[in-house]
Amino acid sequence: APLFSVSLTSLDFQDVVVYSSKTDSVIVTNIGTAELEISLVESNNSDYSIPPTTAVLLPSASRTFYITFTPSSIGVIDGDVEFMHNAASNPDSVALQGTGIYLTVNVSISSRWNILSLPVIPVEDSVHEIFPNAVHPYAYSFDGTSYNQDGRLQFGKGYWAKFPNAEVAVLQGYPSYEESIQVHEGWNLIGSVSQSINVTSISSNPPGMVTSSFYGFNGRYFISNTIESGKGYWVKVNQAGELILSSLVIGNLSLGKIRIIASDELPPPPPDGEMELWSYGVVPSEFALEQNYPNPFNPSTVIRYQLPVDSWVTLKVFNVLGEEVETLVDEFQDAGFKMQEWNASASASGVYIYRLITSNGFSDVKKMTIIR
């Protein structure tokens, strides 16, 4: 007669992050003198999976069965795998146990401004609970034209947050290794997924969207080739759609990959426009005067411009009658990306004009609006 023997009568998978997987195995041996026919192997708990299989084992033959634990919740999860066969002991079973745990991610934070994101889907999504040491009980998201104060954080979005001191934040929650992030034409502040990915793996919908480089922040902007879990990034896109971040192996997405085209343009400044943060070690290729940000504004705005060579620079503000309101810059400056803040607390609501003139013959004007 056939005799069923299993190497282990119980398996303990111990701690496994929710939605992640761990595989273990048992060995079934026919210790009888006739064929052992295994007609069905199944689990009574969907968190434990085993490929549907049958087997015929000759006397003294063995077969390895692989069991995978993928917890869908937090805490201890019990189950059984049952073997249906033609031996006298039918059915036989293996007791299963494992514990679902949260994913824990450590996020390094610098003093002052940081661009951050959620590396996990937290149980509590308030800024105060996630970043209790932040200066404000809210973080700043970007809607394409201006910053918004958000008291709760969303997975996939990037946020500015300010801290008095450097620290390491410990975040716990459910992992997500793939996310489709809605973006609009222009600059976007995006987040990350639960595992760091290379920017060359990012795809888009519609396929082949054109983007700028991805800019991280560590006291100044830098071009990043990696989307790190827990960090946020600026990226400029040529059209509205979705950026798809994934650390999963989901086939060849080369036809849907984004096209990254580098440029000298830098992302918007932080919410309070702190000027000392914006040094950047690249010399622009041409003169340019950019639109102030924010616009409209009250009471302060930031004007950015770029100098490909050293120049004497004059930057002035005029009212609509052509009368000079204020001189913001009148000095010799080295080549580079420049920023100048204008605090218009003493000026009335309305339209104003700012003009940049350099000793190299470059001149440009743009309009801005104060709204009280």
Image (spheres, rainbow, N blue to C red):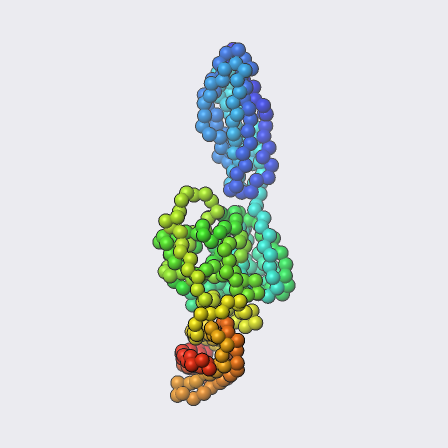
Q: Is residue 298 above or below residue 208?
A: below
Q: Residue at x 43, y 85 (%)?
A: 318
Residue at coordinates 52% horizontally, 17% vertically from top-left? 61
Counting from the top left corner in percent of width and height, residue 333 is at 52, 78
Q: Nearer the viewer, residue 106 or 257?
A: 257
Q: Quadrant of residue 364?
A: bottom left
* Front residue of 66 and 138: 66
- 221 in relation to 6, above or below: below
Is residue 177 positioned above or below 98 on the image? below
- Total numbered labels placed on residues in the image: 0
Q: Residue at x 49, y 30 (%)?
A: 50
Residue 283: image x %, image y %?
A: 49, 69
Q: Please name whichever residue, 231 or 130, is drawn nearer the observer in this view of the structure.
A: 231
Residue 343 visible in the shown view = no
Quarter of the rendering occupied by the C terminus? bottom left
Q: Note whether residue 309 is visible.
A: yes
Residue 82 horizontal/vertical position (percent): 51, 25
* The quarter of the displayed image where residue 60 is located: top right
Instruction: Farthest residue to the left: give it.
Output: 206
In this rendering, position of residue 219 left or right of residue 362? right
- Percent across and percent down for residue 327 are 49, 84
Name the residue at 51% across, 20% down.
91
